[in-house]
Image (spheres, rainbow, N blue to C red):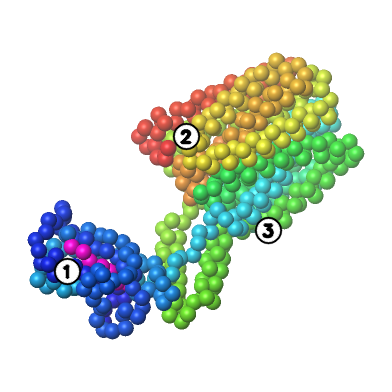
Amino acid sequence: MPGPSQLVSDDPPEIAASPRTEPPGGMPNVTLYEDRISDFGSTSPPLHSSRSNDRRTPLLNLSLAGRKSTICSRGSQDGLSQVSLSLVSFRKDSIDPVRDSQPQIIGLDLEDATDSIPGPPSAKDQGYAWVVVLMVFLLNTITSGYVKSFGITYSLILDYFPEATGSQSGWIMGLLVGCRGLLAPAMGALTVIIGPRKCVVTGGLLCVAGFLLAVPAFNIPYLAVTLGGVVGIGMCMAETPGFLLVTDYFDLKRALANGFRAAGNPTGGFLFSPMIVFLQQYYGLRGAFFIIAGVMLQLVLVGMLLRPYDLHERLVQAKYWKEKQRDCNATDLHQIRRIQQRAAAAAATQGAGGKKKPLDFTFLKNPAYLVYLFTMMCSAAALPNAIFYASLYGRAIGLTDLQNSAIASYVSCCDIIIRLLCGVIFNREKANKRYGFIIGLLLGGIGCLSVPLCTNMWHLLVFGTMYSLCMAFYWTLVNVLLADQFGGEAMASTWGFFRMFQGICNFVYPSLLGLAMDVSGGVSLPYILMGSLLILAALIFATQPLVAKLPGSKIIL
């Protein structure tokens, strides 16, 4: 009984028997054709002695030692179908000119030609992936929005505790931003182990608990523990799964999706800054904490909609096969079952061999990855501290709280627009993400160095524009660069370690900048330090192509 697909010769006798010049390797020519299923009703393969009688459409040409051959494949009654081929070795001495005066079968093996039904579509870059991006956008709007507007809260806390020094109150900001980044590797590993949904819901509940515990507002150390430590841990648990999910759900449109995700940060800053001022004026500082706790409760609802990617992929495949089974006949149903079984076996093998590691410490030995860590250690001085101190500098030059709130909202609004544009621009293949990252750092450094020259609100708006460009390029591109250069499956480690070291720096820098403010008696010196470190960060990242040539560097440039 012949297989479902056979190789036959359709050369005329005079051509088959005549001498010919064979190409290197002694391999003849083969043409692939698609036959209808009726061709294989007999126990012998169909033989086509001339090309004029064969009206089938060729599928593929192969070189087989100067002779012409065809492959007849079983197909559906409705027309052509896809063929899965497996070629084996051909031997020159297996071709007999006399024997080949008639069409003959020669050594070609077609593996599983019955698998004529295409596999399920990709679960990435479409459908529920955009729902996930929207949920991560809302998640960032709530968490990062509060952090970006913390400069307003910081000023209100200093008014509530006038005896507090800059270094003492810096502990609140340090614990909030530090815990938010320091625990990122642990939260990334926790996301891999228990799933993103449980991680976000737990983080949201911790944020609610932190704000409710902060309502008494006994003193600065108490607020440092509640508003800083507890809320910071909760925000880290709620934020980290979002970064990983966007990488899982997107491949071709990853830059665009990250731009939309990252736009949630400034959107929250745009909304939270005036909201906190409004709440403090009408309900006081303690009442504002109580209401913000209710806002943080929405993180639980958002977390419920964050479907794990492996579950989403299984649902997409199940829906696809269900539709195929409904539309196919009995013969095709047998093919579908075979494909499903092999797809399940392949997925199990891939899952066993390519399972995500919660943490991969070998990246800490990779010089190319260490460039990111050193870049971040310098940039963390200004991101996000520069916007926190903007309200203090505004007060120093005579601006009101409403004007400071307007500046913070303007910076957030610019940040939203630039992040979206950044995602669109750098989603193109020709756009160089690494150059954009470096340009953003340089613009931010120049903006911070220009702050001591500002004397009114309009000057600070210019600084805010340059700082928005820096933040937009930085936070939109860093995730994409890590995924592109080190692999999306390693994001739990590469992004986790990046955020961990950022958390360490953000724990230290606020107190150091507060000390510099106490020593200098103003905010000019902290801005000079922040601007200089941003420029240094750009120079460090620019050395990446050189570092990639060092032994032990593993990176895709």
Q: Residue at x 31, y 80 (%)?
A: 40
Residue 521 screen position, x and y as percent: 74, 16
Q: Nearer the viewer, mark 2 or mark 1?
A: 1
Residue 537 screen position, x and y as percent: 54, 27
Lateral position of residue 463 relative to residue 488, left or right: right
Q: Which mark is residue 304?
A: 3
Q: Residue at x 68, y 40 (%)?
A: 265
Quarter the C terminus occupies? top left
* Mark 3 residue type: Met
Q: State the residue in front, 494 or 7.
A: 7
Disc 1 packing (10 Å; few <14; some 14–19; many ≥20) = some
* Mark 2 residue type: Leu
Q: Which mark is residue 430?
A: none
Q: How many marks?
A: 3
Magenta stretch prevailing secondary structure: strand
| Quadrant in the picture for residue 233 | top right
Residue at the spot of label 2:
370
Q: Residue at x 67, y 47 (%)?
A: 137
Precedes in sequence: disc 1 or disc 3:
1
Q: Which mark is residue 12?
A: 1
Lateral position of residue 225 relative to residue 442, left or right: right
Lateral position of residue 556 relative to residue 175, left or right: left
The stretch of residues the image draws in magenta is 67-73
- Is residue 69 on the magenta stretch? yes
